[in-house]
Amino acid sequence: MTEQNFAVIAKILPEPVALINGEGEILFANQSFEKFIGHAESLTGANLFDCTITRPYKLAEFLRNCSRSRQMTIGALN
């Protein structure tokens, strides 16, 4: 699935959805994700570390685990 195909599908979903690379750069975020994070403006190009209050070490560990796989990873941060 291309990033563009992902974005088309994710835009219509009511759930918060984002495509984030291993360094935390937000490649795509739907409106529900932006509301969930608490931002009214587009988060594309922003760094997730700058947009969340999740403990940085937990976020970095989660992103490293996701980036080790070539598969789409679904996950949640606690």
Image (cartoon, rainbow, N blue to C red):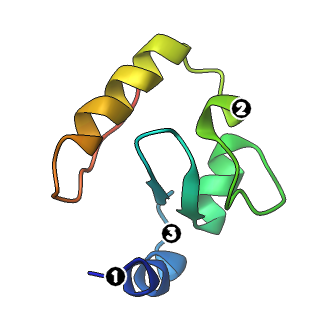
Q: Which three-letter amino acid code belongs to the residue tagged 1?
A: Thr
For the image, the number of numbered tags is 3
First reached walking from the N terminus: tag 1 or tag 3: 1
Q: Which three-letter amino acid code belongs to the residue tagged 2?
A: Asp
First reached walking from the N terminus: tag 3 or tag 2: 3
- Residue 34 location, x and y as percent? 68, 55
**Residue that carries the numbered disc 2 in the rendered image:** 50
Q: Is residue 24 left or right of residue 46?
A: left
Q: Quadrant of the N terminus?
A: bottom left
Residue appearing at x 26%, y 50% in the figure:
74
Residue appearing at x 46%, y 12% in the figure:
57
For marks 1 and 3, give the one nearer the viewer.
Answer: 1
* Residue most extreme to the right: 41
Where disc 3 sits, the SS reads loop
Q: Which three-letter amino acid code belongs to the residue tagged 3?
A: Pro
For marks 3 and 2, give the one nearer the viewer.
Answer: 2
Distance between the Cα atoms at labels 3 and 2?
A: 24 Å
Where disc 1 sits, the SS reads loop
Q: Quadrant of residue 62?
A: top left
Mark number, residue 14: 3
Distance between the Cα atoms at labels 1 and 2?
A: 26 Å
- Residue 55 location, x and y as percent? 54, 13
**Residue that carries the numbered disc 1 in the rendered image:** 2
Q: Is residue 62 left or right of residue 34?
A: left
10 Å crowding of disc 2: few (<14), some (14-19), many (20+): few
